[in-house]
Amino acid sequence: MKNVTVSMDDSVADWARLEAARRNTSVSRLLGELLADKMRHDDAYERALQDWLHRERSWASDGQPYPTRGQGL
């Protein structure tokens, strides 16, 4: 586990202290958990985006018009 120093505005530090107390944890643990959640979310989004980008498209209409917005799929 790495030990890091973080600089932040006073109002952010005050919020972090209150939030950590509300969760009965330390500011350090709170920041670690928030960053880990952000990392998992960003990784999941990136995987989904790459999956979508590399998916084979078959947008052919076979001569039929595409449905309008009001018709849905």
Image (cartoon, helix red, strand yellow):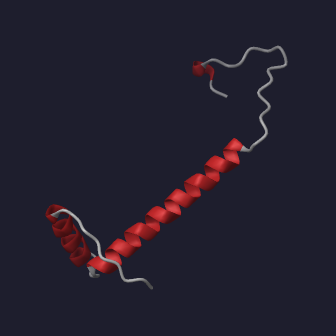
Q: Position of residue 39 (x, y in %)?
A: 49, 64
Classify 17 as above or below 57: below
Q: How many marks?
A: 0
Residue 26: name its quadrant. Answer: bottom left
Q: Position of residue 6 (x, y in %)?
A: 29, 72
Q: Residue at x 75, y 43 (%)?
A: 55
Q: Is residue 17 rendered to the left or right of residue 55? A: left
Residue 8: name its quadrant. Answer: bottom left
Between 22 and 49, the one lying in front of the other is: 49
Classify 73 as above or below 45: above
Q: Residue furthest bottom?
A: 1
Classify 27 as above or below 10: below
Between 22 and 73, the one lying in front of the other is: 22
Q: Is residue 58 rendered to the left or right of residue 5? A: right
Q: Residue at x 18, y 62 (%)?
A: 9
Q: Residue at x 51, y 57 (%)?
A: 42
